[in-house]
Image: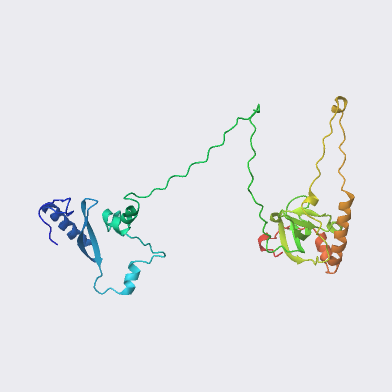
């Protein structure tokens, strides 16, 4: 492509003319680009009236010996193709000028219908703001508003090795080393276990599953009724503080020992009775639950099979 020697811009014609210096620079740029590209490149000139300068676009042609498979590897397909009325030649520069898009979009027809002016929608009137009344009462101290708790309780996942009737070994707490029978998992995620109390002295209590070892020994607890036991059953009753007079303030009072309610004692006996029947059906299981677990010299915990 040959370019004229002078660079002139006509407002009526809307054409560009490149001077001799611009032609030489473009030729040098094309020569340098050909050395670094494997594909053939050819410069083409685009006349854009609205921008007022000449744009060079390098269109790539298919090299000799290229196949359809190679073409797909070179240009990956888009999942959602983008369709536009004015595709970009290069980034930020469209194929059609501003005046061309004016006719393609049919804006001239919209103007003709509205007397040569684009229709404009009047903005919706804003609703009148409600009058803010000052509070009649001002607190002497700043009262902090409690934060809204949006936390939702998620059920704790039970270990696969722990199933109803599994014999567990307690690793911490008051009954450390004792063997207990797992009854069910409560809503809080804690485990409901018992010794039974008549065999090893462990009553109905809640235990965290992080502090137990699940064994392969199991007990049939199908005859044990544990529906009434939940987290509220184990909740402590709030004690009312007694007001002391001047004379009673200096007198040391002996604290009465807390006694277990009679209804909880009856619940423990009922669970033990049905559980001991199932334990006695298995030989040596009663003695196994009564014995405390401990490690002796030479025993390796990581090699033990529980």
Q: Is residue 92 above or below residue 37?
A: above
Q: Is residue 90 above or below residue 258?
A: below
Quick one: 287 or 280, which is closer to the camera? 280
Quick one: 73 or 93, which is closer to the camera? 93
**Could you tell me if residue 67 is visible in this image?**
yes
Quarter holding the C terminus is bottom right
**Could you tell me if residue 38 is visible in this image?**
no
Estimate the x, y position of residue 299 in percent, counting from the top left.
70, 60
Q: Is residue 277 above or below residue 53?
A: below
> Dividing the picture into quarters, in which one does residue 94 lie?
bottom left
Estimate the x, y position of residue 7 in percent, counting from the top left.
13, 51
> Dividing the picture into quarters, in which one does residue 81 lie?
bottom left
Estimate the x, y position of residue 221 in percent, counting from the top left.
80, 65
Point 66% across, 61% down: residue: 302
Point 69% across, 55% down: residue: 210
**Total numbered labels placed on residues in the image:** 0
Point 80% across, 51% down: residue: 233
Quarter holding the N terminus is bottom left
Point 32% across, 55% down: residue: 107
Quick one: 224 or 10, which is closer to the camera? 10
């Amino acid at each position: 492509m040959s370019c004229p020697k002078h660079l002139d811009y006509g407002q009526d014609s809307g054409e560009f003319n490149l001077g001799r210096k611009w032609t030489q620079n473009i030729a040098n740029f094309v020569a340098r680009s050909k050395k670094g590209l494997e594909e053939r490149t050819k410069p083409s000139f685009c006349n854009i009236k609205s921008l007022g300068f000449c744009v060079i676009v390098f269109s790539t042609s298919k090299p000799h010996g290229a196949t359809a498979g190679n073409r797909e590897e070179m240009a990956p397909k888009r999942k959602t193709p983008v369709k536009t009325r004015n595709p970009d030649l290069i980034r930020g520069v469209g194929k059609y000028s501003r005046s061309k898009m004016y006719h393609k979009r049919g804006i001239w027809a919209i103007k003709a219908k509205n007397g040569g002016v684009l229709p404009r929608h009047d903005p919706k009137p804003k609703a009148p703001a409600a009058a803010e009344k000052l509070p009649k009462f001002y607190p002497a101290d700043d009262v902090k508003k409690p934060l809204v708790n949006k936390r939702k309780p998620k059920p704790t996942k039970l270990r696969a090795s722990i199933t109803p009737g599994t014999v567990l070994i307690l690793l911490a707490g008051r009954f450390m080393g004792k063997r207990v029978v797992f009854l069910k998992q409560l809503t809080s995620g804690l485990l409901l276990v018992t010794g039974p109390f008549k065999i090893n002295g462990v009553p109905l209590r809640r235990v965290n599953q992080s502090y137990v070892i699940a064994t392969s020994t199991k007990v049939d607890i199908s005859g044990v009724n544990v529906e009434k036991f939940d987290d509220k059953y184990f909740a402590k009753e709030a004690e009312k503080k007694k007001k002391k007079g001047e004379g009673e303030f200096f007198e040391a009072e002996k604290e009465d020992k807390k006694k277990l309610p009679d209804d909880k004692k009856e619940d423990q006996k009922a669970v033990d009775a049905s559980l001991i029947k199932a334990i006695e059906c298995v030989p040596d299981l009663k003695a196994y639950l009564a014995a405390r677990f401990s490690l002796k010299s030479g025993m390796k915990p990581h090699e033990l099979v529980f």
